[in-house]
Structures are given as C-alpha cells and as structure tokens.
Amino acid sequence: MALMFHDKELTELMEDFYILTGMRIVLFDENFTELVSYPMNRETFCTCMRKNNEFAEKCHKSDNISFCKCRDTRTLNVYKCHAGLIEATAPILENNRIIGYMMFGQITDMKNRNEFLQQMERLCIAYGADEDMSGKIRRIKYRSGRQILAAAKILDACTGYIQLKDMVHLSGRQLIEPIEAFVDEHMSEEITVERICREFGISRTKLYKLTGEYIEGGIASFIKHKRLEKAKHLIRTTDLPISRISDEVGFSDYNYFLREFKRKYGISSRACRKQYKECIKDK
C-alpha cells in the first residue's frame, strides 16, 4: 500500500523525538516495511548482529509479532525483543483504519551495566559474532522503566499529532477505494456527502478534493453511476420488477430513474432487459 508522507515535517518531528528521548524512531507502513527513520542507522550492535541470518530472522519475527499485536489491539505496545532490548510500537490511523506504525527501540532497562554487558556478550557468542562487540554493547542506551513509559506515551501522542497534521496518509486512490465499497454496500439507502464525511472522518473539502481528482464528475455523479450500473446488472440477470430494482439501488423517484437510465445507456430499462434476454437466447 502506498503511504504518502510530508518528508520535511515528519523528519523534524522524528528529530525532536530523538532530541527529547535519545531513542531512534522509525515509520513503517501497514505491511511492516520501514520507510523513514531518525537517526537513519540502527545501533551498531544491532547492525552487526543482523549480519547473522538467524539473528536477523528472529529480529524480523519479533518486530512482526509486535506489529500484529499493535494492529489487533489498535493500541501502543511496549515489549522486549528476542535480544532482550526494549521497543515500543504505536499505530497510525486514518479514517479509523491503521495505515502505518511508529516504533522506537534498541535500548535497555537493565541498570547494572556490567550485568547487561555480560548478558549481551553471551548472546554474541551464541550467534558466533566474529568481532569484539563490547564497545558496541556499551553504546546501547539505558533508560529506566519510568523513562521508557514516558517515551512510549510521547510516541503515542506523536501518532495523534501526525494524524492531526496529515503528515502521513494513504494515496488518494486508496482513500477512494473504501468510499466506493461503502457506496456499494449502502446503495439502497440515502447516501449524502454529510454521511460519507461522517463515516470516514473527513471534511467536505477533503472529500471534494479527492473525488474531483480521482472520480470523473464528482461524488454525486459517481454515486448515480454506481446505482445505474447495479440497476443494469439486476435488469439483465434477474426477473425483479424494474420498479423494485429502482428502489433497491437507491432511486426514490421511479420516473427519474427511468430517465437517467435511458440517458446513460441510450436505451430504456425494459428494452435493455429484452435485448439481453434475446442475446442470451441466441447463444
């Protein structure tokens, strides 16, 4: 899924988070693909250890477990990765749909640095690290449990700020798709601009901008087009009375439906049914 973001504003926010917490922060899309981070590079310990395929695979699996939990609960998730380092993941929502994630990590809550060093050195030996890792381990930052919780809350607040400022969003085409699905599902009901805006949590201005860019003729024309296409399908494939079909696709005025159908397809609804049946019979 194409995730769009305002690079300058987002990078500034991520840099601010790093200045405040000293923790690396990363943006992922909904498929758990890393898009942008600050700082750009991981801790040198993680970079070196990921050269081991088994270690890298466990890192990937650990991240995915966190993303899936965050996706299922739709809330912030703080956890320890397979290497024992602290990480946190928070969902980014648009129109009540998760479109990405923010993550920080690669820190420890072990206050005893000697104990931490020994634990991580044992991990390095287990994965056959081929260089002295003690210096890289010492560069892993310590944060208390309270500091980690505070940073996690700030991370969660950042996702809300990102949503408020529209720093990260789906491409216009992908915002239109759920609107199309909504129209299909609720075709027999009254569908107004106000209802669509309320359903998807967007303003009239944004809706008109999206539909003007991706839907020829705008939202009202699009809804009518979908209703007429559905009516044509039902006329051809069922024996339902045309007046009932008009109701089922959302036309409250039957005569208006008849006029619009003929205007769009150049043939009356009854002639359309007759023509289609004759075509099927000939086959």
Image (spheres, rainbow, N blue to C red):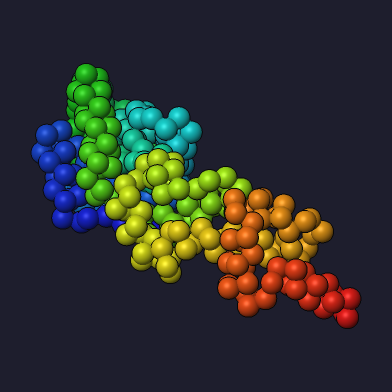
Res. 133 visible in picture: no
Res. 20 visible in picture: yes
Residue 4 horizontal/vertical position (percent): 31, 57
Give the residue at the far bottom of this rendering: 282
Q: Dividing the picture into quarters, in which one does residue 228 lie?
A: bottom right
Count of numbered badges drawn on the protein: 0
Quadrant the N terminus occupies: bottom left
Residue 189 horizontal/vertical position (percent): 57, 45
Residue at image point 89% right, 76% down: 281
Residue at image point 26% right, 29% down: 152
Residue 108 horizontal/vertical position (percent): 26, 28
Nearer to us in this view, 177 or 240: 240
Where 118 sits versus 255, above or below? above
Where 46 sits versus 229, above or below? above
Q: Taking 157 as reference, is 101 left or right?
A: right
Residue at image point 34% right, 35% down: 89
Residue at image point 80% right, 72% down: 274
Nearer to us in this view, 249 or 157: 249
Q: Taking 69 as reference, is 237 left or right?
A: right
Q: Taking 51 as reference, is 184 left or right?
A: right
Nearer to us in this view, 36 or 109: 36
Where 52 sits versus 213, above or below? above
Quadrant the C terminus occupies: bottom right
Nearer to us in this view, 205 or 10: 205
